[in-house]
């Protein structure tokens, strides 16, 4: 199955991770206009 996620923020990344767990063979495309790759803001201080 093919999935397209609009938004590369935390919700989009969690959606992609969840889809990957449910369907390991799926094609997942994340579309976003963020200039940086996805990251966890909670992990930055560490």
Image: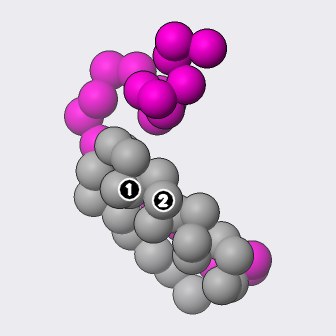
Pinpoint residue 11: horizontal percent, then vertical percent.
Answer: 35, 56
Give the crowd class for mark 1: few <14, some 14-19, many >=20 residues within 10 Å.
some
Q: Gap in Å between the C-alphas at discs 2 and 1?
A: 5 Å
Q: Is residue 42 in the magenta section? A: yes
x, y percentage for residue 2? 51, 79
Residue 2 visible? The answer is yes
In the displayed structure, 18 sits above or below 40; it is: below
Q: Residue at x 61, y 14 (%)?
A: 46
Residue 6 x %, y %: 27, 58
Please name the residue that numbered disc 2 is placed on.
14
Magenta span contains residue 4: no
Q: Nearer the viewer, residue 29 or 17?
A: 17
Q: Which residue is mark 1?
A: 12
- In the shown orientation, is residue 21 left or right of residue 27? right
- Residue at 29% over, 29% down: 34
Identified at 39% across, 68% down, the residue is: 4
Q: Give the extent of the magenta segment.
A: 24-46
Tag 2–tag 1 contact (CB < 8 Å):
yes
Q: Is residue 23 above or below residue 12?
A: below
Secondary structure state at the residue bearing disc 2 = helix
> Who's the residue at 51% across and 16% down the image?
44
């Amino acid at each position: 199955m093919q999935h397209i996620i609009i938004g590369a923020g935390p919700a989009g990344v969690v959606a992609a991770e969840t889809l990957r767990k449910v369907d390991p063979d799926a094609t997942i495309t994340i579309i976003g206009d963020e200039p940086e790759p996805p990251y966890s803001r909670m992990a930055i201080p560490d």
